[in-house]
Amino acid sequence: MVKIISDSTCDFSPELLQKYDIGIMPLYVVMGDKTLKDGLEATPEDIYAYVDKTGALPKTAAPNLSDYIECFKPWREKGDEVVHFNISSDFSSAYATACLAAKELGGVEVVDTRNLSTGSGLVVIHAAEMAQAGKSAAEIAEECRRLTARVEASFVVDSIDYLHKGGRCSSVAALGANLLKLKPCIEVTDGKMKSAKKYRGNIEKVIINYVTDRLSGRTDIDKHRIFITHTRCTDEVVDQVRDKINELYPGFEEILETTAGCTITSHCGPFTLGILFVRKEA
């Protein structure tokens, strides 16, 4: 048997974790003098409350070597192989530490997803489907490493306040963006985040314009599944996004909605939304 494990940045709902029998290795969220496990001891609402109270952002920290060994070891002792998936190694030391644990235990493949949130999650679900089909850990890891290059992940952000607090944009840029009511689109490219198109106006309208830009005129998208992942967006907004996806690129087998966890929340703040999907093989 092969056990699929992801770190907590995949932003999966409990229902998806159960459906695909995926284990989770939580990252840490540091708020003041408290170090809490992402998703287990800290939630996005805790992030908002902390920022509102202190004006500062929490920090995130990777699991340590003993955390990974403790996570992998029970499966290895049962005789199962493990394939573990990490947030991009450009964002965290988690991948490097997981590799050390894998080397110590043996029978563990570690995959750098080169992505975050459900961009990583798309790769994790594919791995779970391969595991259910009886593929080996080596086969799963090899195919998933190739798949990472075809994942398209992006988000549109309502306010750059959280990006500013986290040191990801200057005070001058933040002031100018807020005065102009700019809503940046953040893309993940080759494992790194970059700012792409900047939108103006009401966030609900901006989100629909963003979805339109990502899907219009495309013929290269794999219709197996697409994620709508967001922070604190209303059901109405999510429904509008789902309708726009069906209008512009009909035929997805699955349109999955998830709420982003602590990592995305701490970077992007509330009213962030992304659509994440896989491109067809060239």
Image (cartoon, rainbow, N blue to C red):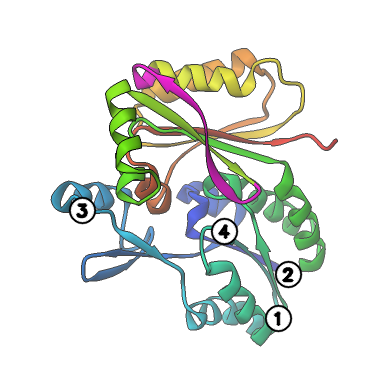
Q: Please state which amino acid type lies under the numbered disc 2.
A: Met
Front: mark 4 or 2 = 4
For residue 239, say whether it is visible: no
Residue plotted at (34% across, 27% down): 234
User: What's the distance in space between the residues labelled 1 and 2, CA to CA?
Assistant: 8 Å
Residue plotted at (57% across, 59% down): 90
Are dots 1 and 2 in contact, CB under 8 Å? yes
Sequence order check, earlier mark of 4 and 1: 1
Q: Read off the residue under disc 4.
A: 90
User: What's the distance in space between the residues labelled 3 and 4, CA to CA?
Assistant: 26 Å
Are dots 1 and 3 in contact, CB under 8 Å? no
Q: Read off the residue under disc 1.
A: 79
Front: mark 4 or 1 = 4
The secondary structure type at the circle numbered 3 is helix
Specify the label residue 1 is tagged with. Answer: 2
User: What's the distance in space between the residues labelled 1 and 3, CA to CA?
Assistant: 43 Å
> Is residue 248 shown in magenta?
no
Sequence order check, earlier mark of 1 and 3: 3
Sequence order check, earlier mark of 3 and 4: 3
Question: In the drawing, does residue 64 fall left or right of residue 161?
Answer: right
Q: Please state which amino acid type lies under the numbered disc 1.
A: Gly
Could you say which quadrant of the image residue 244 lies in?
top right
Specify the label residue 50 is tagged with. Answer: 3
Could you say which quadrant of the image residue 36 lies in?
bottom left
The secondary structure type at the circle numbered 4 is loop
